[in-house]
Amino acid sequence: MEANGWHRYTQLSRLARVAPLDMTQAAFLSRCKSLHELWQRVPNGILRSMLRSAGCPAKDVKDLASGKLLQALLNIVESLDAQQESIEAFSSEDAREDWNRRNERLAALFLNNDLRVAEAHDAVGEALQTLQAMGFDTASLNQGYGRALDFVFDAVIDAFAAINQPLRKVLTS
């Protein structure tokens, strides 16, 4: 945190606190909600503008929320990366095939949203189902939610790495 200067960001500082292994479900869901709120700060307007520039129909992107916008961006840059295209190929008059397909590499972002909803509605069963859908062994939850929090954080980090990897390749080729 210190090395990257992140200590100046209150929300990051709170999220970076070590989670006790015996963390309560309420504390777990609260941190999942905070994590969701953090990545929700990616400006939707910029993402929509990028997608329109890539040829996605304005009418199709205007009502998409951040998760779907990031998913569409990932689909486009993965396609460009697979074809070894540079950033110059990003702009297009026509939408790329499958720009709006479901991308499993970002599943954690949508599941993190489900945990946010579970926190807001005090839905214990939904939280457990979401953790299981993410691949977490919920049998360990009787010891606390600390490992579950690490698991969710790692999954969300991996989702953003999935976006960054092809985006970096396209931008630097």
Image (cartoon, grey):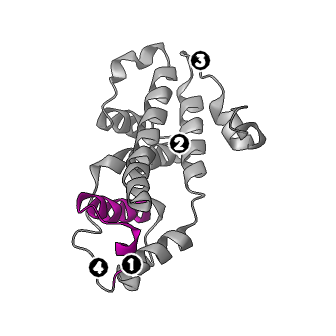
Q: Which mark is residue 122?
A: none
Q: Residue at x 57, y 60 (%)?
A: 42
Residue numbers of the magenta segment? 68-92
CA distance for labels 3 and 2: 19 Å
The crowding category of the residue bearing disc 4, from other C-alpha atoms within 10 Å (few below 14, some 14 to 19, many at least 20), is some
Q: Which residue is mark 2?
A: 119
Instruction: Work out which residue is located at the far front of the displayed protein and give it.
Output: 173
Task: Kindly report which numbered mark, 1 or 4, lies closer to the viewer in this rendering.
Answer: 1
Q: Of marks 3 and 4, which one's residue comes earlier in the chain?
A: 3
Circle 2 SS class: helix
Q: Based on the displayed image, in which of its 4 quarters is residue 52 positioned?
A: bottom left
Which of discs 3 and 4 lies nearer the camera? The answer is 4
Give the spatial CA distance, label 3 vs label 1.
47 Å
* Disc sitting over residue 20 in the figure: 3
Secondary structure beneath dot 4 equals loop
Looking at numbered disc 3 in the image, what kind of residue is underneath it? Pro
Mark 1 is on which residue type?
Ser
Alpha carbons under labels 1 and 4: distance apart = 10 Å
Q: Is residue 148 magenta?
A: no
Residue 68 position in % (x across, y down): 39, 63
Give the residue at mark 4: 95
Check contact, mark 1 vs mark 4: CB within 8 A. Answer: no
- Mark 2: few/some/many CA within 10 Å (<14, 14-19, 20+): many
Which tag is nearer the camera, tag 1 or tag 2?
1
Q: Given the image, on which type of amino acid does mark 2 rest?
A: Glu
Nearest to the eye among marks 3 and 1: give it: 1
155 and 37: which one is in front? 155
* Quadrant showing the N terminus: top right
Circle 3 or circle 2, nearest the eye: 3
Residue position for label 1: 91
- Mark toward the start of the polypeptide (4 vs 2): 4
